[in-house]
Image (cartoon, rainbow, N blue to C red):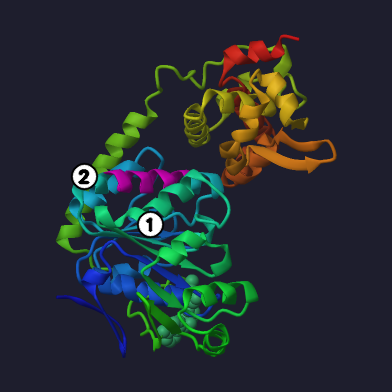
Amino acid sequence: MSVLNLGPELTVPLEEVVGQCVAILGIRGSGKSNTAGVIFEELLEAHYPLSLIDIDGEYFGLKEKYEVLVVGGGDHADVELSMATVGEVANLSLHEGVPVILDVSDMLGGEREAVVFDYLTRLWSLAGRLRTPYLIGIEECHEFIPQGVRTRLKDVIARIALRGRKRGLGAVVISQRSAKVEKDVLTQAGMLFLHRVVHEADMRVYGELLPWRKPEAKEIVSHLGIGECIFLSGTVARKVKVRLRTTFHGGYTPSFCPVESPKLRQVRGRLLEALARAQDAASRPPAEAPAPLALPPAPEWDRAPDAPSIVGSTDLPLPVLVRVDRLLRRLRRLPPVQQRVVGFLVREEPTAYTTDELAAWVDCPEALLRVEPPVAALDLGLVACERLARGITYRGMVRQYVDEAFRGFIPSLGPEGTRQLVAYLRRQIADLAPVERDLAYTP
Ligand SMILES: Nc1ncnc2c1ncn2[C@@H]1O[C@H](COP(=O)(O)OP(=O)(O)O)[C@@H](O)[C@H]1O
Ligand SMILES: [Mg+2]
């Protein structure tokens, strides 16, 4: 039976990790990422397939010793990632047992959420069929599974952490904000590595997790050194020291030449082919989508000061149009009411509307908007929510969205190109639900 050698006096039988939820907590610099890295090294040593959701691009160093495919952005990616190809990566990782680092370090909030959601959803459903041991590691998990907030991404992660065992799925969740992580996930975790914390709120969480009297727990936890933690498995807790990882810790420039094994190269070749096919299929214009370059004349209502003419949109470079297309695809997957709301707010930007005004304009019951606020558009940053004296209001934010999401393109677009992009995007989004637009404009 394989064991994971995590420290001088810390070995864990591999089978205890299968389908397990493992939590690694502690303040910044306490050694969490190192502990996680050591666990991943040991799992890779045992040829255990896994995916790491790497939001800081700090795990690529595992490639030094192990066959790991780094997918995504960042300087160390082997293969690029897009919404069109994310499913293929999950597919190959689970079917072929290829360890994957999903490097989302260069993605912004909305895009990152969408990619991670699609990836994990695919892994979840594939695992239901395959039922083989597989582990998913998630750094900064408080961003994905925050306490007290419900998102679709949180739902899928919580499902993996709490109910993955039957499918062979386990999770390693890592966070420096213990008090901000969904409590259910922490209390259900079968194995915890509790590094040092100092804040009272985090200490309270530890107090609830540890089988010790609270003053005693506080005394021990506050004196933990770097790399030391309380190892809690089942109901047994003890202080341990985790070894230092042997592969590079991200952030350092690697001074090695990664040696690619034939097996990984083979997978990489096939993965690249599969991704190219998926990308190709995605770049063909869908039947229902308006061709981005053949635009009808702008209607009266679209003649905002920064939208003088849409004809110039043909000047936008292809990579920009591809990214716009990707965003529109996402928006088209939203429920029709949500599309109407986003379209309306974007068209009316920067005017802010309360929920009841919005409901009247997009012709939907106010109660529905209260239950289903435009969360996806808020996450993407296309819409902002503010609490004003007259109540909660929403308004379009395309201008700011472009500044953020197209930041890399702005220097080459220049002020005129950026204005055209804003106008083009605004128009495309406003056109998402054209029938309702006419309805909304009926006085
Ligand atoms: N077990 C350990 N033994 C020795 N040094 C460690 C250990 N864990 C971490 N360190 C040191 O502390 C630094 C910060 O660790 P890291 O794992 O990045 O912390 P965190 O993820 O909690 O912010 C590392 O670069 C390393 O030098
Ligand atoms: Mg860290």
Residue placed under numbered mark 2 in the picture: 129
Crowding near the residue tagged with mark 2, few <14, some 14–19, many ≥20 C-alpha atoms within 10 Å: few
Give the number of the disc on residue 231.
none
Residue placed under numbered mark 1 in the picture: 162
Which secondary structure type mostly characterizes the magenta part of the structure?
Answer: helix
Nearer to us in this view, 68 or 209: 209
The residue drawn where x is 48% and y is 36% is 319
Crowding near the residue tagged with mark 1, few <14, some 14–19, many ≥20 C-alpha atoms within 10 Å: many
Q: Secondary structure at mark 2?
A: helix
Where residue 408 appears, as percent x and y from the top left, is 57, 47
148 sits to left or right of 191:
right
Where residue 66 appears, as percent x and y from the top left, is 25, 68
User: Label 1 amino acid?
Assistant: Leu
113 sits to left or right of 369:
left
Of the 4 image quadrants, the one containing the N terminus is bottom left
Q: Secondary structure at mark 1?
A: helix
Mark 2 or mark 1: whose residue is earlier in sequence: 2
User: Label 2 amino acid?
Assistant: Arg
**Residue 349's quadrant in the figure?**
top right
The residue drawn where x is 30% and y is 67% is 63
199 sits to left or right of 305:
left
Region in magenta:
114-125
Where residue 390 appears, as percent x and y from the top left, is 83, 35
- The question of residue 121 being in magenta is answered with yes
Where residue 425 appears, as percent x and y from the top left, is 60, 29
Q: Is residue 365 above or below residue 386?
A: above
Q: Nearer the viewer, mark 2 or mark 1?
A: 1
Of the 4 image quadrants, the one containing the C terminus is top right
What separation in Å lies between label 2 and label 1 (alpha carbons)?
A: 18 Å
**Residue 78's quadrant in the figure?**
bottom left
